[in-house]
Image (cartoon, grey):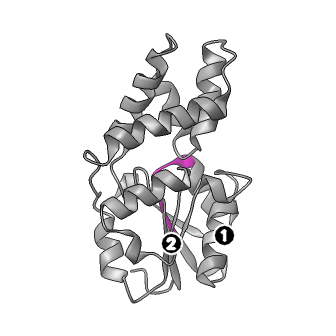
Amino acid sequence: MYERYDGLIFDMDGTLLDTEPAHYKAWNITLARYGMEYDESAMAALNGSPAWRIAQDIIDRHDSRLDPYHLADEKDRVLRTIVLDSVKPLPQIEVVKAWYGRRPMSVGTGSSRCLALSLLDSLNLRKYFVAVVTADDVEHHKPAPDTFLRCAALMGIAPEKCLVFEDADFGIQAAHRAGMDAVDVRVL
């Protein structure tokens, strides 16, 4: 099924790992300190975005003057304390295991480098990937193609020969803008 592709790229949150409940919990804990709330339905449209972009949206909704980068860092610190025990791999990890050693693979995520590597290491998954590209590694985030283009470059594969696995509209748009095909794991 994936034989025609020379490289496979996987989003992390919601595609490889079930991190959504932990992200929601971390946002709620962090925002409670400031008397703010996290609206899951309003934030669903921002899935795949770096934490600072989500923080900016929350700040705007609450007419706050907080710094989005500081708020995102605070949320990520909370997340690291609660997430490692609660995150489990999703079914796409079986695709990774099946194709390991047969095709180069990478992770392209909107999460911070520290968080992404902590999660992949805690579940002993980093060994499967040639590269991990995070929000810290690119200037323009999903839906811009930069994350996936960097993955392709690090794997040494032309973008049009890569297949992206994603669970968010921003990520699917980014894959298409990079000239890559995409699998929407929400419909599998």
Please state if 11 lies on the left or on the right of 98 as rendered: right
Give how far across and how far down residue 54 sits, in percent.
Answer: 58, 33
Camera-side residue of 124 and 108: 124
Secondary structure type for disc 2: strand
Examine the rendered structure and indicate whether residue 168 appears above or below residue 130.
Answer: above
Q: Residue at x 64, y 36 (%)?
A: 53
Give how far across and how far down residue 57 sits, in percent.
Answer: 62, 26
Q: Residue furthest right?
A: 139
> Which kind of residue does numbered mark 1 sit on?
Arg
Ranked by sequence position, the earlier of labels 1 and 2 is 2
Give how far across and how far down residue 159 sits, in percent.
Answer: 65, 76
Label placed on residue 150:
1
Q: Is residue 40 at least partly visible in the picture?
A: no
Please state if 135 lies on the left or on the right of 37 as rendered: right
Determine the CA span between mark 1 and mark 2.
Answer: 10 Å
Q: Toward which corner of the image does residue 175 lie, by quadrant?
A: bottom right
Q: Residue at x 54, y 47 (%)?
A: 48
Crowding around mark 2 (Cα neighbors within 10 Å: few <14, some 14 to 19, many 20+) is many
Secondary structure type for disc 1: helix
- Is 166 magenta? The answer is yes
- Is 133 magenta? The answer is no
Q: Which residue is mark 2?
A: 106
Examine the rendered structure and indicate whether residue 143 appears above or below residue 128.
Answer: above
Task: Tell whether label 2 touches label 1 (CB within 8 Å).
Answer: no
> Which kind of residue does numbered mark 2 sit on?
Ser
Quarter occupied by the C terminus: bottom left
Q: Residue at x 66, y 77 (%)?
A: 153
Q: Which residues are magenta?
A: 164-169
